[in-house]
Amino acid sequence: MIEILYFAWVRERIGLPREKVETTAGTVSELVAELSAREERYALAFSDLSALRVAVDQELTDFDAPLEGVREIAFFPPMTGG
Amino acid sequence: MEVRVQEAPFAAGAELDRFTARADGAGAVVSFSGIVRDDSGQMAEMLIEHYPGMTEKALESIAGQAVERWSLADVLVIHRFGAMKPGDQIMMVATAARHRKHAFEAAEFLMDYLKSRAPFWKQERGPDSTEWVAAKQDDEDSLTRW
């Protein structure tokens, strides 16, 4: 089980702030493909990965990152702090 | 080193006085405050969403890098989340160093990094529209100078 978190407009498009998912995906990209195949709202949220950022266990990473042993993944748009 | 992520407003002047008082041996203190700006004249509210847990970790990591790189005596980062009005303080950073050049550079580094590497997202709410603020390429580009 992996906990997936969504923020900002990604959260709005998917319609959930977080969910637990059972997956056999080996990388973040594979998980994205799996979710996108599941329902239209995921396909829509993940349609342009260049507009998204991903954090694995609260560390920024890229879509090739492996998922072995990972507890938490977050998807969100580029950050706008400050 | 002090990093705070909070919903409550803060008084930048009082924070700066406290920070300066404890920055023993530093010859220079630089501070920056970010304020909610209403460019359109239509903003009723700004909402800042964040990623609890990761936000603190990211800010601590950025602050730690600044301390090490510029041998800072101390650093303070305060960043708010939640609802704010135009004119409200969003965040502040303060740096204390032996010399001003290091204090200025470290403050700029902190600002550049926390703009696009700390998990905050701004949303502007007007009378009839709500919009997520898009990240600027300039902000991303400014990281390359470090």
Image (spheres, rainbow, N blue to C red):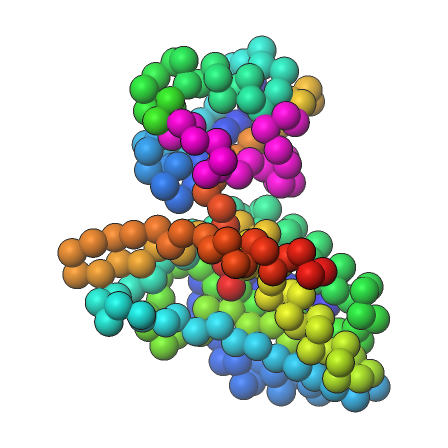
Residue furthest to the top: A24
- Residue range in magenta is A45-65
Pick whichever, B113 or A16, lies toward us. Answer: B113
Q: Is residue B143 left or right of residue B67?
A: left
Residue drawn 69% across the image and 78% down it: B104
The image quadrant of residue A37 is top left
User: Residue B6, relative to residue B87: is it above or below?
Assistant: above
User: Residue B121, relative to residue B104: is it above or below?
Assistant: above
User: Residue B132, relative to residue A27: is it above or below?
Assistant: below
**How many numbered marks are there?**
0
Q: Is residue A56 magenta?
A: yes
Q: Is residue A80 left or right of residue A67?
A: left
Pick whichever, B90 or B99, lies toward us. Answer: B99
Residue drawn 16% across the image and 56% down it: B128
Residue drawn 62% across the image and 41% down it: A60
Q: Is residue B117 magenta?
A: no
Give percent across and percent down for residue B71.
83, 71
Give percent across and percent down for residue A22.
52, 14
Give percent across and percent down for residue A25.
58, 14
Residue drawn 62% across the image and 33% down it: A62
Pick whichever, B84 or B101, lies toward us. Answer: B101
